[in-house]
Image (cartoon, grey):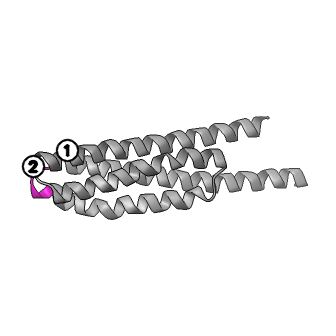
Amino acid sequence: MTLAQHKTEEHRTANKSKDGSLERVRAAAQELHAAITSAAAKHGEAVKEELKSIVPKAKAVVASLNESLGVQTEAIKKQLSQAIPHLEATQKHVAESLKATGHAAEASVRQAVLDAHAAVQKITEALAAKRTAESTHVHS
């Protein structure tokens, strides 16, 4: 293996690790969205029970996203950072829904679903941009 081939292989391995990290963050955000959507479909105390388990999941997604930021390029970091306010709003709305009742609780859950969806969208866009940049870099 030549030095150039070795460096190319190192670059691919590093990118797969970064890409895998971002894939895991996206998967976790998708699971969060699915959990909130599932809770929203329930009624009564079942909603609150499910939402209680969502609070730590939301915090874990934010923590994973923050860890992933450290290994991304500046352009990807900028895109990913756009997901953070949506995840923080998701946490806020889930917490509000646990304290509220009736229509206020339902509205908070609906808003949490929307915020989680927006976060997934931003993470997916960042992942797509990352893949496009890598594809362009490899082919040039």
Tag 2 residue: 102
Please check the rendered image and state whether residue 42 is part of the magenta-colored stretch, yes or no.
yes
Q: Position of residue 24 (x, y in %)?
A: 49, 55
Residue 110 picture quarter: top left
Please check the rendered image and state whether residue 98 is part of the magenta-colored stretch, yes or no.
no
Give the residue at x 64% y 44%.
Answer: 75
67 shown above or below 133: below
Q: Nearer the viewer, residue 94 or 47?
A: 94
Does residue 69 appear to the left or right of 61 in the view shown? right
Give the number of the disc on residue 20.
none
Which secondary structure type mostly characterizes the magenta part of the structure?
A: loop
Give the residue at x 27% y 44%.
Answer: 111
Give the residue at x 33% y 56%.
Answer: 91
Q: Nearer the viewer, residue 19 or 62?
A: 62
Three-letter code, disc 1: Ala
Part of the protein shown in magenta: 41-46
Tag 1 residue: 107
Three-letter code, disc 2: Gly
Does residue 40 appear to the left or right of 134 in the view shown? left
Q: Which residue is situated farthest in the right direction here?
A: 2
Q: Nearer the viewer, residue 91 or 126?
A: 91
Does residue 11 appear to the left or right of 3 in the view shown? left
Q: Position of residue 92 (x, y in %)?
A: 31, 55
**Around disc 2, counting alpha carbons within 10 Å, would you say few (fewer than 14), some (14 to 19), or many (20 or more)?**
few
Name the quarter where the C terminus is drawn.
Answer: top right
Q: Position of residue 70 (x, y in %)?
A: 61, 59
